[in-house]
């Protein structure tokens, strides 16, 4: 199974509009972060996690030509508002979009034209909303387990597929969700910045959670412009060992997962 990090940035993206900080001015391409999203490919099955604001650009850059499903973590704009740009991938058949009841309700409200009869022309995506109810999902040859996590006061979802798990916008992991993550070997998890935040893990909190999960390979995502890729890599390499490593992810990163 191949995981491609389409976007590794927070809601502003990096560089941030109007900002002249060191990271926003950085020439390192790994500091150029679009909104967080990953693409999962296994055999002929192609699954997207979140349709962020930058999805059109990400899809063109990654050469996405088809999708079998979209998994939504939650309905915040930076994870959802590229949904209309799936339209060219839904001509042949409806695209299943999986999420919680609350997320799907938000999609119906914000993209109401998709689900109502409108004039011919203009185009709209052909979407099939699916409430996963927290139950396992079968897509092609993949079995996907929704993992509830806390995003401030909200309950949102990460996803586990075999030895891999993806968790973003998380500020806390319930005990029962740690149980769902037991045995994960490769983990992508959000680490907004060094300073505390009400609705996101800091770098240190993400490290602590990943150690509790026990993953041997951890990639930090949803990084803001407080975080330099080069500096964070250097800091983490001082703490990494032969049995486990934690590193910042970046747009375009490809990870091979042994199923």
Image (spheres, rainbow, N blue to C red):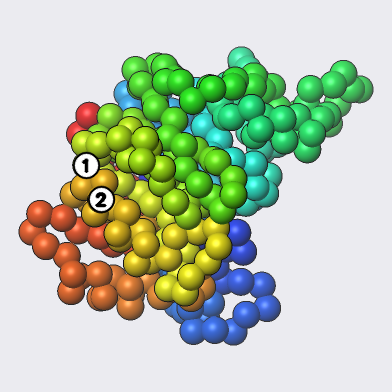
The picture places residue 53, in percent across and down from the top left corner, at: 64, 50
Residue farthest left in this picture: 242
The answer to whether any part of residue 98 appears in the image is yes
The picture places residue 64, in percent across and down from the top left corner, at: 49, 36
Q: What residue do we see at 41% from left, 43% from top?
A: 174
Q: Quadrant of the N terminus?
A: top left
* Camera-side residue of 1 and 180: 180
Residue farthest front in this picture: 175
Residue 17 badge:
none
Q: Quadrant of the C terminus?
A: top left
The picture places residue 196, in percent across and down from the top left corner, at: 48, 70
Say above or below: 45 vs 158. above
The picture places residue 251, in percent across and down from the top left corner, at: 43, 56
Q: Is residue 85 left or right of residue 35?
A: right
Rendered image quadrant of residue 228: bottom left
The answer to whether any part of residue 252 appears in the image is no
For the residues carrying marks 1 and 2, which lies nearer the camera in this image?
A: 2
Q: Secondary structure at mark 1?
A: loop
Marks 1 and 2 in Cβ contact (< 8 Å): no
Q: Secondary structure at mark 2?
A: helix
Q: Is residue 201 left or right of residue 208?
A: right
Q: What residue do we see at 62% from left, 51% from top?
A: 78
Tell me the crowding category of disc 1: few under 14, some 14 to 19, or many 20 or more residues within 10 angstroms, Cα based.
some
Q: What is the number of callouts on the image?
A: 2
Tell me the crowding category of disc 2: few under 14, some 14 to 19, or many 20 or more residues within 10 angstroms, Cα based.
few
Dot 1 or dot 2: first in sequence order is 1
Q: What residue do we see at 59% from left, 22% from top?
A: 131
Rendered image quadrant of residue 102: top right
Residue 212 badge:
2
* Cα distance in 3D space between marks 1 and 2: 12 Å
Q: Which residue is mark 1?
A: 185
Say above or below: 23 vs 53. below
């Amino acid at each position: 199974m191949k995981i491609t990090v389409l976007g590794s940035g927070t809601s502003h993206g990096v560089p941030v509009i109007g900002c002249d900080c060191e990271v926003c001015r950085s020439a390192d391409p790994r500091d150029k972060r679009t909104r967080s999203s990953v693409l999962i490919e296994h055999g002929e099955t192609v699954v997207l996690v979140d349709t962020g604001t930058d999805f059109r650009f990400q899809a063109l850059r990654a050469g996405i030509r088809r999708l079998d499903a979209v998994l939504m973590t939650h309905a915040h704009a930076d994870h959802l508002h590229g949904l209309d740009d799936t339209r060219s991938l839904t001509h042949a058949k409806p695209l299943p979009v999986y999420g919680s009841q609350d997320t799907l309700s938000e999609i119906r409200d914000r993209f109401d034209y998709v689900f109502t009869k409108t004039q011919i022309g203009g185009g709209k995506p052909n979407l099939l909303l699916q409430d996963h109810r927290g139950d396992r999902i079968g897509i092609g040859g993949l079995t996907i387990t929704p993992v509830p996590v806390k995003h401030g006061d909200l309950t949102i979802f990460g996803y586990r597929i075999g030895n891999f798990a993806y968790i973003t916008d998380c500020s806390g992991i319930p005990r029962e969700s740690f149980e769902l993550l037991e045995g994960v070997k490769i983990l992508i998890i959000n680490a907004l910045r060094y300073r505390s935040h009400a609705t996101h893990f800091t770098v240190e909190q993400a490290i602590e959670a990943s150690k509790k999960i026990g993953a041997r390979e951890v990639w930090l995502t949803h990084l803001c412009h407080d975080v330099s890729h080069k500096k964070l890599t250097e800091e983490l390499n001082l703490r990494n060992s032969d049995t486990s490593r934690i590193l910042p992810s970046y747009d375009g990163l490809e990870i091979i997962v042994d199923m």
